[in-house]
Structures are given as C-alpha cells and as structure tokens.
Image (cartoon, grey):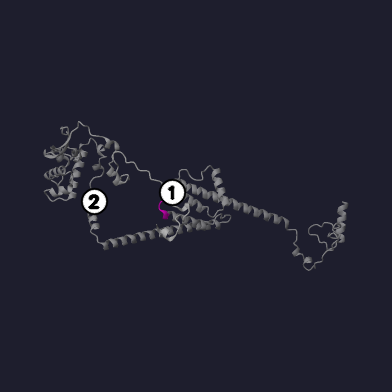
C-alpha cells in the first residue's frame, strides 16, 4: 500500500498529457583513442584549455631496436673563454652521446666595442679632461661588462659619474667612425652620428625624475591644481581672443556696409550685421574644435554666408557656379582654393541681389512715368476748380434699364472744358468761321 491507497485517491489523477514523459536516453560519449579511461573520467570529456598532443603521436610507439638511457656527462660552453667543464644529465640513444655545442650558447650576445690605435688617439681622441690610461681602462671595462655603465662606474678606478663615462665612450666612438669613413656621408645614417649623446640633457632628466619620484602626496595635489589653473587661464585667454576677433570682424563688416549705403545710388543687398555675426560664430566654433576637415569648414562658411539669402537665391548661386564650370565643392580643397571659392560665392550672391534691386528700381521708375503721363500740367485738378468746391451732389436720373438718361445724346467734351459755362457768341462765331474755312 502507498499514500494514495490510504487516502483513497485514485492513482491516475492527472491526465495523460500532464504525466511525466520519459526522457530519451542519452547517447554515450565514445572515449577518444589514445586517452586512458581514468583521464577521460576525470575530465568528463571537456576539451582541455591547452592544446593536446596529436593522437597520432600518442599511438606512435618507440622502435623496438632503440635503447634510451640517461647519463651524467660533462660539457663545455663555447660562450666561455676559460674552458670550464661542467656536468649534466644527457639523453643517450643506443649508447651514442649527442654531439654539438651547448644549446644555450647561442643566447650569449656580446657588444662589439671599437678599438683604436695610439696614432688614432693622438690625432682624433685627445681630451684635456681624460688621460689615455683612463680611456683605455674605460674601453676595457666596456668590453668586459657589455656597456653596463652602472657596473663600469662601480669598477672604474677614478671617481667618474655614469654620464661622464657615457659621454667619453660615445664621443670616442663617434670620432673614430667619422675618421675611418671615406666620406662623412657614408656614416651619416649611423645612430651615433644622427643622435649624439648629450650628457647635460641626461643629467637634467635624471634630476627632474628624482624630484618627481621624491614628491609627497601634498605636493602632487598642489602641482595638479596648478596645472588645472594654468589650463583654465589659457582657455579663458583663448576665448577672450576669439571674442575680440569676432567683434572686430563684425564692426569692420558693419562699417563697410554703412559706407556703401551712405553713397547715393548704392544698394544694400544683404544686411551686414547678421552675416558678420554668423561668420564670427562659425569661426569661433571652428576654433573651438581645434581639429577639423577643411571641407567641413568650407560647408560651414558657405552656410553662414548664405544664411540671409532665400532658398531660391541659393539655387541660383549654385546654377551660376555650374554655368561657369565651377564645382560646387572644390576637388582639391586647399586653403587658398577654399578661400577663392568662398569669395566667388559671395560675389555671385552680391550680383544676384544687385540685379534684384535693379529690377525693383526699374519697376518703380516705370510706374512713376505712367502716373506722370495721366496727370499732365495742362489739366487742372478737380480740387483746384472753384466751381466744384461748393457744388452740391445731385444724382442723375436713371432709366428702367439702369442707363443714364440722355447719355447717348451727350457729346464728349475735351479736357478743361466746363459744361456749366454757356458758350459766348464770340466763341460760336469763331467756330463757324473755322468750319467754313
């Protein structure tokens, strides 16, 4: 019996879909060839982090006729000059010991120290601060200790600093290279000729390094604050200089525009103040970037110049450039080319604005001429006539169709003729005589 029988619960209470499905049996991993069963069980089949040995090498068996033994044999090192004989364990195959030089002798590298003769010393290497015996001792120690000048300074008989020893060695070597060369151009590429040793600079460098390493935490913080303050002052001066240049540029542009508008007949196509302000702002933003492409700067300056012009005017400028055979963007954007391109755009924009102003003035003049033709000097104005000032307004009678009565019977009167004043007999007589004649 189980708990379900005691509680009276049927055994199959869950539907078949909710019953636990049996998991498919896992495929057993086959042990690779060449690996022992214990090692495979410890690793669990996980690939090793380090590259494993090739399986072919594991399966490779030692030849049956090869007999390997380890023997305690003596050896000599070709890097040593004292023929010292030491011993180590050596793998011997079939009783034949290995031959050849010691394997680690190839790592023994030595410096080729230049040699000089007594004649060369007398001709090229004399120095009042150094004797020949001290120079010979220096070169012997340099060859012995492979230019490790700290050890050389410790072994040197007279009290000389490391910088003095280096300066003497490199100056002698440099003089010998120049003296032995057929011409100075043959050794001009040698490191000692291109970059001679500077003892004063090396002494100053070590002194500065010693001061930095001997600083306390408080001194380091103080130096950091001083550097930050110096950087802030430099940035403030740079911003002030840029603002001053921008103000001077804006003032000069506004003054030039005022001079143009002061003369009669001159036009002002573009307001100089907004354009100068845009140019100054663009120059200030470019200076703040420090590093930028010249094509990007040209685009920014073109936008600043065309900021006060409309979209139609900008398209006309581009069309004019294409008609002139000039690219919208220079192919070789050097400084001079970009400046000339920008100046050409300014001149085209000025020309288009001048044409627009000319058309406007021409239309204004034509409208003025038409107005002066209608008002001739011989025609008196209605406001100046004495008969029209006190005359009351009397509406004319209208017919049924809306036409004025007697309109067709009226005769057209010439300018300046008054309909109210009756014709005099003299006037009628003159008219009759004119008609008869």
| Residue at 74% across, 64% down | 383
Which quarter of the image is occupied by the N terminus?
bottom left
| In-front residue for pair 337/285 | 285
Percent across and percent down for residue 311 are 56, 52
Label whose residue precedes the other's in the sequence (2 or 1): 2
Dominant secondary structure (helix, strand or loop) of the stretch shown in magenta: helix
Q: Can you tell which mark lies on residue 201?
A: 2
Element under disc 1 = loop
Q: Residue at left 60%, top 52%?
A: 356
* Residue 334 in view in this figure: yes
Q: Which mark is residue 293?
A: 1
Highlighted magenta segment, given as a residue range: 287-296
Q: Nearer the viewer, mark 2 or mark 1?
A: 1
Q: Quadrant of residue 392?
A: bottom right
Percent across and percent down for residue 402 are: 83, 60
Q: Position of residue 77 (x, y in %)?
A: 15, 38
Distance (Cα) linking label 2 and label 1: 38 Å
Magenta-span inclusion, residue 291: yes
Query: In terms of secondary structure, where does tag 2 sit?
Result: helix
Residue 101 appears anywhere in the view: no
Q: How many neighbours does mark 2 have within 10 angstroms: few (below 14), some (14-19), or many (20 or more)?
A: few
The answer to whether 177 appears left or right of 417 in the picture is: left
125 vs 15, nearest the viewer = 15
Residue drawn where x is 62% and y is 51% of the image: 359
- On whether residue 88 falls in the magenta region, the answer is no
């Amino acid at each position: 019996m189980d708990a379900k029988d005691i509680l009276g619960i049927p055994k199959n209470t869950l539907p078949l879909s909710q019953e636990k499905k049996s998991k498919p049996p896992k495929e057993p991993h086959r042990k690779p060839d060449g690996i022992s069963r214990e090692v495979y069980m410890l690793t669990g089949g996980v690939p090793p982090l380090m590259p494993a040995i090739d399986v072919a090498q594991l399966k490779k068996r030692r030849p049956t006729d090869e007999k390997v033994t380890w023997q305690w044999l003596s050896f000599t090192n070709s890097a040593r000059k004292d023929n010292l004989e030491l011993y180590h364990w050596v793998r011997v195959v079939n009783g034949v010991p290995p031959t050849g030089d010691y394997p680690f002798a190839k790592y023994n590298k030595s410096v080729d120290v230049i040699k000089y003769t007594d004649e060369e010393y007398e001709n090229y290497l004399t120095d009042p601060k150094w004797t020949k015996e001290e120079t010979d001792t220096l070169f012997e120690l340099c060859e012995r200790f492979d230019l490790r000048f700290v050890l050389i300074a410790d072994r040197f008989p007279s009290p000389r600093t490391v910088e003095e020893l280096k300066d003497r060695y490199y100056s002698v070597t440099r003089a010998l290279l120049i003296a032995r060369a057929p011409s100075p151009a043959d050794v001009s590429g040698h490191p000692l000729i291109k970059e001679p040793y500077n003892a004063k600079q090396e002494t100053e460098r070590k002194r500065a390094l010693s001061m930095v390493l001997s600083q306390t935490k408080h001194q380091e913080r103080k130096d950091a604050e001083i550097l930050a303050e110096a950087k802030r002052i430099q940035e403030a001066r740079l911003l002030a200089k840029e603002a001053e240049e921008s103000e001077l540029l804006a003032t000069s542009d506004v003054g030039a525009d005022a001079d143009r508008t002061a003369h009669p007949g001159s036009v002002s196509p573009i307001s100089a103040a907004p354009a100068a302000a845009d140019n100054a702002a663009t120059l200030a933003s470019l200076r703040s970037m420090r590093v930028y492409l010249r094509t990007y700067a040209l685009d920014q300056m073109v936008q600043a110049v065309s900021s006060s012009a409309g979209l139609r005017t900008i398209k006309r400028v581009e069309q004019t450039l294409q008609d002139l055979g000039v690219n919208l963007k220079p192919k070789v954007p050097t400084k001079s080319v970009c400046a000339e391109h920008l100046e050409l755009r300014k001149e085209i924009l000025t020309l288009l604005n001048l044409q627009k102003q000319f058309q406007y003035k021409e239309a204004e003049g034509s409208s003025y001429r038409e107005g002066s033709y209608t008002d001739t000097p011989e025609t008196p104005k209605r406001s100046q006539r004495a008969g029209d000032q006190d005359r009351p307004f009397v509406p004319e009678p209208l017919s049924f169709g809306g036409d004025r009565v007697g309109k067709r019977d009226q005769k057209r009167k010439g300018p300046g003729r008054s309909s109210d004043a009756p014709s005099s007999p003299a006037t009628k007589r003159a008219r009759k005589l004119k008609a008869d004649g």
